[in-house]
Amino acid sequence: MTAVTTDALAIAPSASPWRRGFRRLLQRRGAVFGAMVVGLFIAVALLAPWISPYDPLATDWGAVRKAPSAAHWFGTDEVGRDVLARVLWGARASLLAGVISVAIALALGIPIGMLAGYAGGWTDTVIGRVVDAMLACPFLILAIALAAFLGPSLGNAMIAIGITATPIFVRLTRGQVLTVKVEDYVEAARAIGNREMRIALRHVLPNVVPPLLIQASLAIAAAIIAEASLSFLGLGQQPPAPSWGSMLNTAQRFLTQAPWMAVWPGVAIFMVVLAFNLLGDGLRDAFDPRQN
Protein backbone atom coordinates (compact mmCIF):
# COMPACT_ATOMS: atom_id res chain seq x y z
CA MET A 1 0.00 0.00 0.00
CA THR A 2 2.82 2.36 0.86
CA ALA A 3 4.60 1.74 -2.44
CA VAL A 4 1.43 2.38 -4.43
CA THR A 5 0.76 5.61 -2.54
CA THR A 6 4.33 6.80 -3.06
CA ASP A 7 4.18 6.07 -6.79
CA ALA A 8 0.86 7.89 -7.11
CA LEU A 9 2.27 10.95 -5.39
CA ALA A 10 5.34 10.83 -7.58
CA ILE A 11 3.37 11.02 -10.83
CA ALA A 12 0.75 13.48 -9.55
CA PRO A 13 1.23 17.06 -10.76
CA SER A 14 2.99 19.19 -8.17
CA ALA A 15 0.74 22.15 -8.75
CA SER A 16 -2.12 23.33 -10.91
CA PRO A 17 -1.39 25.23 -14.14
CA TRP A 18 -2.53 28.44 -12.43
CA ARG A 19 -0.03 28.00 -9.59
CA ARG A 20 2.78 27.16 -11.99
CA GLY A 21 1.87 30.22 -14.05
CA PHE A 22 1.94 32.52 -11.03
CA ARG A 23 5.31 31.09 -9.96
CA ARG A 24 6.70 31.86 -13.41
CA LEU A 25 5.16 35.33 -13.22
CA LEU A 26 7.02 36.05 -9.99
CA GLN A 27 10.29 35.15 -11.74
CA ARG A 28 9.83 37.94 -14.30
CA ARG A 29 11.18 41.19 -12.90
CA GLY A 30 9.39 43.38 -15.43
CA ALA A 31 6.01 41.85 -14.59
CA VAL A 32 6.65 42.16 -10.85
CA PHE A 33 7.65 45.81 -11.29
CA GLY A 34 4.52 46.44 -13.37
CA ALA A 35 2.32 44.79 -10.75
CA MET A 36 3.88 46.89 -8.00
CA VAL A 37 3.35 50.13 -9.93
CA VAL A 38 -0.24 49.17 -10.76
CA GLY A 39 -0.85 48.37 -7.10
CA LEU A 40 0.65 51.73 -6.12
CA PHE A 41 -1.64 53.64 -8.49
CA ILE A 42 -4.66 51.69 -7.29
CA ALA A 43 -3.78 52.54 -3.70
CA VAL A 44 -3.32 56.19 -4.64
CA ALA A 45 -6.71 56.25 -6.37
CA LEU A 46 -8.47 54.64 -3.40
CA LEU A 47 -6.71 56.73 -0.75
CA ALA A 48 -6.80 60.07 -2.60
CA PRO A 49 -9.23 61.71 -0.12
CA TRP A 50 -6.83 60.98 2.74
CA ILE A 51 -3.39 61.46 1.18
CA SER A 52 -4.16 64.48 -0.99
CA PRO A 53 -2.49 67.56 0.56
CA TYR A 54 -5.15 69.97 -0.76
CA ASP A 55 -8.63 70.03 -2.20
CA PRO A 56 -8.10 69.42 -5.95
CA LEU A 57 -10.80 71.99 -6.79
CA ALA A 58 -9.69 74.72 -4.37
CA THR A 59 -8.28 77.79 -6.12
CA ASP A 60 -5.70 80.16 -4.67
CA TRP A 61 -5.20 83.35 -6.69
CA GLY A 62 -2.16 84.18 -4.61
CA ALA A 63 -0.37 81.03 -5.78
CA VAL A 64 -0.98 81.01 -9.53
CA ARG A 65 1.51 78.91 -11.52
CA LYS A 66 3.94 78.58 -8.63
CA ALA A 67 6.94 76.32 -9.20
CA PRO A 68 7.32 73.15 -7.11
CA SER A 69 8.14 73.98 -3.50
CA ALA A 70 7.80 72.66 0.03
CA ALA A 71 4.22 73.95 0.13
CA HIS A 72 3.27 72.55 -3.29
CA TRP A 73 5.50 69.61 -4.23
CA PHE A 74 4.30 69.50 -7.85
CA GLY A 75 3.62 73.22 -8.15
CA THR A 76 0.29 74.89 -8.89
CA ASP A 77 -1.76 75.44 -12.04
CA GLU A 78 -3.22 78.49 -13.77
CA VAL A 79 -5.74 79.18 -11.00
CA GLY A 80 -3.59 78.18 -8.03
CA ARG A 81 -4.81 74.60 -7.62
CA ASP A 82 -2.30 72.11 -6.24
CA VAL A 83 -1.02 69.91 -9.10
CA LEU A 84 -0.14 67.01 -6.78
CA ALA A 85 -3.69 66.89 -5.44
CA ARG A 86 -5.10 66.93 -8.95
CA VAL A 87 -2.74 64.17 -10.12
CA LEU A 88 -3.76 62.01 -7.16
CA TRP A 89 -7.46 62.53 -7.78
CA GLY A 90 -6.98 62.20 -11.53
CA ALA A 91 -5.75 58.63 -10.96
CA ARG A 92 -9.31 57.77 -9.98
CA ALA A 93 -10.74 58.92 -13.31
CA SER A 94 -8.07 57.22 -15.40
CA LEU A 95 -8.07 53.86 -13.59
CA LEU A 96 -11.87 53.85 -13.37
CA ALA A 97 -12.11 54.53 -17.08
CA GLY A 98 -9.60 51.79 -17.87
CA VAL A 99 -11.22 49.11 -15.72
CA ILE A 100 -14.85 49.88 -16.52
CA SER A 101 -14.19 50.28 -20.25
CA VAL A 102 -12.50 46.89 -20.41
CA ALA A 103 -15.27 45.36 -18.26
CA ILE A 104 -17.83 46.62 -20.79
CA ALA A 105 -15.75 45.18 -23.64
CA LEU A 106 -15.52 41.81 -21.86
CA ALA A 107 -19.23 41.77 -21.03
CA LEU A 108 -20.09 42.35 -24.68
CA GLY A 109 -17.22 40.55 -26.39
CA ILE A 110 -17.24 37.21 -24.57
CA PRO A 111 -20.91 36.26 -25.24
CA ILE A 112 -20.76 37.44 -28.85
CA GLY A 113 -17.43 35.68 -29.46
CA MET A 114 -18.73 32.50 -27.81
CA LEU A 115 -21.82 32.59 -30.03
CA ALA A 116 -19.78 33.14 -33.19
CA GLY A 117 -17.22 30.46 -32.43
CA TYR A 118 -19.55 27.81 -31.05
CA ALA A 119 -22.52 28.25 -33.37
CA GLY A 120 -20.58 28.80 -36.58
CA GLY A 121 -22.41 29.01 -39.90
CA TRP A 122 -24.19 32.19 -40.91
CA THR A 123 -24.09 33.47 -37.32
CA ASP A 124 -20.31 33.42 -37.36
CA THR A 125 -20.28 35.04 -40.81
CA VAL A 126 -22.54 37.95 -39.81
CA ILE A 127 -20.70 38.62 -36.56
CA GLY A 128 -17.35 38.36 -38.34
CA ARG A 129 -18.29 40.95 -40.95
CA VAL A 130 -19.51 43.40 -38.30
CA VAL A 131 -16.33 42.93 -36.27
CA ASP A 132 -14.17 43.39 -39.37
CA ALA A 133 -15.99 46.62 -40.19
CA MET A 134 -15.39 47.99 -36.68
CA LEU A 135 -11.75 46.94 -36.69
CA ALA A 136 -11.27 48.70 -40.02
CA CYS A 137 -11.72 52.02 -38.21
CA PRO A 138 -8.77 53.20 -36.06
CA PHE A 139 -9.48 52.58 -32.39
CA LEU A 140 -9.13 56.18 -31.21
CA ILE A 141 -11.05 57.66 -34.15
CA LEU A 142 -14.03 55.39 -33.48
CA ALA A 143 -13.89 56.16 -29.75
CA ILE A 144 -13.88 59.92 -30.47
CA ALA A 145 -16.86 59.55 -32.82
CA LEU A 146 -18.88 57.56 -30.27
CA ALA A 147 -17.97 59.90 -27.41
CA ALA A 148 -18.97 62.93 -29.47
CA PHE A 149 -22.27 61.25 -30.35
CA LEU A 150 -23.04 60.32 -26.72
CA GLY A 151 -21.94 63.66 -25.28
CA PRO A 152 -18.95 64.84 -23.25
CA SER A 153 -18.71 63.12 -19.86
CA LEU A 154 -16.55 60.51 -18.18
CA GLY A 155 -19.36 57.94 -18.21
CA ASN A 156 -20.00 58.35 -21.92
CA ALA A 157 -16.27 58.20 -22.61
CA MET A 158 -16.07 54.85 -20.79
CA ILE A 159 -19.01 53.52 -22.80
CA ALA A 160 -17.44 54.71 -26.06
CA ILE A 161 -14.07 53.13 -25.23
CA GLY A 162 -15.73 49.89 -24.10
CA ILE A 163 -17.76 49.54 -27.30
CA THR A 164 -14.73 50.37 -29.42
CA ALA A 165 -12.62 47.70 -27.65
CA THR A 166 -15.32 45.02 -27.94
CA PRO A 167 -14.31 43.69 -31.41
CA ILE A 168 -10.87 42.74 -30.09
CA PHE A 169 -12.42 40.50 -27.43
CA VAL A 170 -15.00 39.11 -29.86
CA ARG A 171 -12.27 38.00 -32.25
CA LEU A 172 -10.05 36.60 -29.48
CA THR A 173 -12.93 34.70 -27.85
CA ARG A 174 -14.06 33.28 -31.20
CA GLY A 175 -10.56 32.06 -32.04
CA GLN A 176 -10.13 30.40 -28.66
CA VAL A 177 -13.55 28.75 -28.84
CA LEU A 178 -12.78 27.35 -32.30
CA THR A 179 -9.64 25.78 -30.84
CA VAL A 180 -11.19 24.43 -27.63
CA LYS A 181 -14.48 23.07 -28.98
CA VAL A 182 -12.75 20.30 -30.97
CA GLU A 183 -10.75 19.02 -28.00
CA ASP A 184 -11.31 15.43 -26.88
CA TYR A 185 -12.83 16.33 -23.53
CA VAL A 186 -15.47 18.46 -25.26
CA GLU A 187 -16.33 15.61 -27.62
CA ALA A 188 -16.51 13.27 -24.61
CA ALA A 189 -18.88 15.62 -22.81
CA ARG A 190 -21.08 15.72 -25.91
CA ALA A 191 -20.95 11.92 -26.26
CA ILE A 192 -22.33 11.31 -22.78
CA GLY A 193 -25.35 13.49 -23.48
CA ASN A 194 -24.47 16.96 -22.13
CA ARG A 195 -26.51 19.76 -23.64
CA GLU A 196 -24.70 22.23 -25.87
CA MET A 197 -25.29 25.14 -23.46
CA ARG A 198 -23.76 23.17 -20.60
CA ILE A 199 -20.78 22.18 -22.73
CA ALA A 200 -20.20 25.79 -23.76
CA LEU A 201 -20.42 27.15 -20.21
CA ARG A 202 -18.78 24.34 -18.24
CA HIS A 203 -16.13 23.00 -20.62
CA VAL A 204 -15.38 25.63 -23.25
CA LEU A 205 -15.66 28.97 -21.44
CA PRO A 206 -13.29 28.18 -18.51
CA ASN A 207 -10.56 27.25 -21.00
CA VAL A 208 -10.75 30.52 -22.93
CA VAL A 209 -10.56 32.74 -19.85
CA PRO A 210 -6.73 32.94 -19.38
CA PRO A 211 -5.96 34.57 -22.77
CA LEU A 212 -8.89 36.94 -22.23
CA LEU A 213 -7.48 38.06 -18.88
CA ILE A 214 -4.08 38.65 -20.46
CA GLN A 215 -5.65 40.72 -23.24
CA ALA A 216 -7.71 42.63 -20.66
CA SER A 217 -4.57 43.75 -18.79
CA LEU A 218 -3.13 45.08 -22.05
CA ALA A 219 -6.45 46.66 -23.04
CA ILE A 220 -6.62 48.62 -19.77
CA ALA A 221 -3.44 50.45 -20.79
CA ALA A 222 -4.97 51.34 -24.17
CA ALA A 223 -8.20 52.43 -22.47
CA ILE A 224 -6.30 54.76 -20.12
CA ILE A 225 -4.59 56.41 -23.08
CA ALA A 226 -7.94 56.68 -24.87
CA GLU A 227 -9.58 58.29 -21.83
CA ALA A 228 -6.73 60.78 -21.52
CA SER A 229 -7.07 61.58 -25.22
CA LEU A 230 -10.82 62.09 -24.96
CA SER A 231 -10.40 64.29 -21.88
CA PHE A 232 -7.70 66.26 -23.69
CA LEU A 233 -10.21 66.90 -26.49
CA GLY A 234 -12.95 67.85 -24.03
CA LEU A 235 -14.99 64.66 -24.52
CA GLY A 236 -14.12 62.91 -21.25
CA GLN A 237 -13.93 64.12 -17.64
CA GLN A 238 -15.25 67.68 -17.58
CA PRO A 239 -13.46 70.52 -15.75
CA PRO A 240 -12.98 71.38 -13.00
CA ALA A 241 -12.98 67.69 -12.05
CA PRO A 242 -9.36 66.46 -12.22
CA SER A 243 -8.28 64.22 -15.09
CA TRP A 244 -4.79 63.66 -16.47
CA GLY A 245 -5.97 64.33 -20.02
CA SER A 246 -7.76 67.58 -19.19
CA MET A 247 -4.74 68.69 -17.14
CA LEU A 248 -2.55 68.24 -20.22
CA ASN A 249 -5.05 70.20 -22.28
CA THR A 250 -4.80 73.11 -19.86
CA ALA A 251 -1.02 72.82 -19.53
CA GLN A 252 -0.37 73.19 -23.26
CA ARG A 253 -1.04 76.92 -22.97
CA PHE A 254 1.60 77.36 -20.27
CA LEU A 255 4.44 75.07 -21.38
CA THR A 256 7.03 77.85 -21.26
CA GLN A 257 5.82 79.57 -18.07
CA ALA A 258 4.82 76.48 -16.04
CA PRO A 259 6.14 73.23 -17.59
CA TRP A 260 5.43 71.29 -14.38
CA MET A 261 1.71 71.51 -15.19
CA ALA A 262 2.31 69.12 -18.10
CA VAL A 263 5.18 67.05 -16.71
CA TRP A 264 3.43 65.39 -13.78
CA PRO A 265 0.20 64.22 -15.46
CA GLY A 266 2.32 63.10 -18.41
CA VAL A 267 4.61 61.09 -16.14
CA ALA A 268 1.57 59.55 -14.42
CA ILE A 269 0.08 58.42 -17.74
CA PHE A 270 3.44 57.06 -18.89
CA MET A 271 4.04 55.09 -15.69
CA VAL A 272 0.62 53.50 -15.38
CA VAL A 273 0.47 52.55 -19.07
CA LEU A 274 4.00 51.12 -18.92
CA ALA A 275 3.09 49.16 -15.78
CA PHE A 276 -0.02 47.59 -17.32
CA ASN A 277 1.92 46.66 -20.47
CA LEU A 278 4.72 45.05 -18.45
CA LEU A 279 2.17 43.16 -16.37
CA GLY A 280 0.30 42.02 -19.47
CA ASP A 281 3.49 40.84 -21.18
CA GLY A 282 4.47 38.95 -18.03
CA LEU A 283 1.07 37.28 -17.79
CA ARG A 284 1.25 36.26 -21.44
CA ASP A 285 4.67 34.68 -20.96
CA ALA A 286 3.77 33.02 -17.65
CA PHE A 287 0.51 31.47 -18.85
CA ASP A 288 1.62 30.54 -22.36
CA PRO A 289 0.28 26.99 -22.83
CA ARG A 290 3.49 26.00 -24.63
CA GLN A 291 5.36 26.50 -21.34
CA ASN A 292 2.97 24.52 -19.13
Image (cartoon, rainbow, N blue to C red):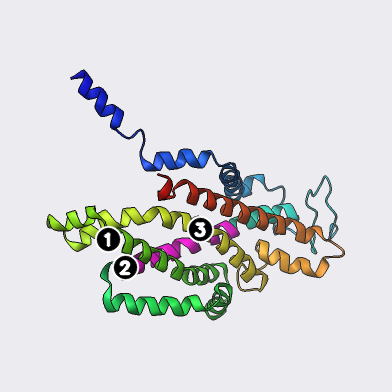
Query: Closer to the N terminus: mark 1 or mark 3?
Result: 3
Instruction: Residue 117: give its label.
Output: 2
Disc 1, disc 2: CB below 8 Å?
yes
Q: Which stretch appears magenta?
A: 93-117
Residue 55, can we see it?
no
Name the residue beneath numbered marker 3. 99
Residue 24, x across and y down, in percent: 48, 40
Residue occupying the far top of the picture: 2
Q: How many marks?
A: 3
Left or right: residue 124 compared with residue 24: left
Residue type of the residue flagged with mark 3? Val
First in sequence: mark 1 vs mark 2: 2
Residue at screen point 28% across, 79% down:
122
Q: Earlier in the sequence, mark 3 or mark 2?
A: 3
> Taking the image as drawn, is residue 157 in sight?
yes
Q: Residues within 10 Å of mark 1 (few under 14, many from 20)?
A: some
